[in-house]
Amino acid sequence: MDLDTYLATGRGVVDEALDRFLPQEDARPAVLHRAMRYSVFAGGKRLRPILAMAAVEAVGGDPRSILPLAVALECIHTYSLIHDDLPAMDDDDLRRGKATVHKVFDEATAILAGDALLALAFEALSSPGMARMRRPERVIAVIGELSAASGSRQLVAGQMSDLLSEGKPVTREDVEYIVWNKTAALIRAATKCGALLAGGSLEEVALLSRYGENLGAAFQIKDDLLDLEGDAAKLGKAVRKDEKRGKATFPRLLGRDEARALMAELLQKAQDAVRSFGERAEPLVMIGGYILKRVN
């Protein structure tokens, strides 16, 4: 399997679904919908939706059958980025090589665009099409899982703890809490929810959840290493900001070499979790390798 082709195909499928579901730019209030579309179509990898679809494949399902979930995942992820970039949070001017939403529009519009995308995610999950295609109890379970993953005890908790920890001494437990909640929670939800909607068994759902959690933590460590060592032109955003702000990261806590070793260990755990799926898990295994080598 060629991973680049697989990822490009997945991005195309997800982009088409997002284009269908998001309000058109001229829908009133037009400035809000322009801001939503600007942020969603600013060049994202669509990693979380693709992981959800790959999890569906792993349990023998049709990845296109869970497109409302794919839309929801990307909307939640994009909302979190819009808010993270705000001056009150990480104060970033660039994202994916383009001006951030609050720079192109204004802060109020950026906040509202993020709010609207979060709401749109759950509109997608509760759409009539989902109810017709999937068993209601599985849809409800997925809505509950994504609500928890994006709420005050996971994604938002991680962001809050990230801000509170800036410039302060931190323990390994502190950094683990931030990484596992700010980043790993939504990636774990992607693979777990994909398996749930596709009718995976309890064991399959648990294995894919474990895969997503470990992969998500490794992904964040790679992000933190790229902030220290990456090329701003390739990353599409400023580098070395974490170091300047005293962010609580594994490279800062453990040093770069130990952080790399931990990342490799987490990726191995992720890949081991899905070995029993055989060839159906090939995309998931290969995505682990991609995260290790990525430059943006």
Image: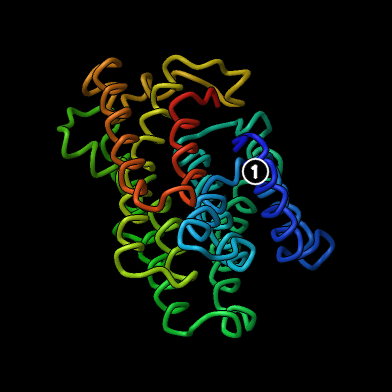
Q: Position of residue 111 (x, y in %)?
A: 56, 54
Is 61 on the left or on the right of 20, as rendered?
left
Residue 210 position (above or below residue 176): below
Q: Please name whichever residue, 290 or 171, is drawn nearer the observer in this view of the structure.
A: 290
Give the amino acid at mark 1.
Val
Q: Position of residue 40 (x, y in %)?
A: 66, 50
Residue at label 1?
A: 101
Residue 174 placed where, x, y %? 19, 39
Q: Relative to 255, does residue 204 appear above or below in the rendering?
A: below
Q: Residue at x 21, y 21 (%)?
A: 254
Q: Quadrant of the N terminus?
A: top right
Judged from the image, the secondary structure of the residue bearing numbered disc 1 is helix
Neighbor class of circle 1 (other Cα within 10 Å; few <14, some 14-19, many 20+) is many
Quarter containing the C terminus: top right
Say how many tags the image has: 1
| Figure check: 151 above or below 261 | below
* Residue under the point 55% across and 56% down: 53
- Of 108 and 42, the residue lying toward us: 42
Q: How is the image coloured?
A: rainbow
Asked if one can make out residue 127 in the rendered structure from this viewpoint, the answer is yes
Identity of the residue drawn at 35% across and 65% down = 148
Q: As drawn, which residue projects farthest toward the front?
A: 278
> Taking the image as drawn, is residue 36 in sight?
no
> Can you give x and y, in whole percent of width and height, for residue 83 in the image?
51, 48
At 43% from the left edge and 36% from the top edge, which residue is drawn?
288
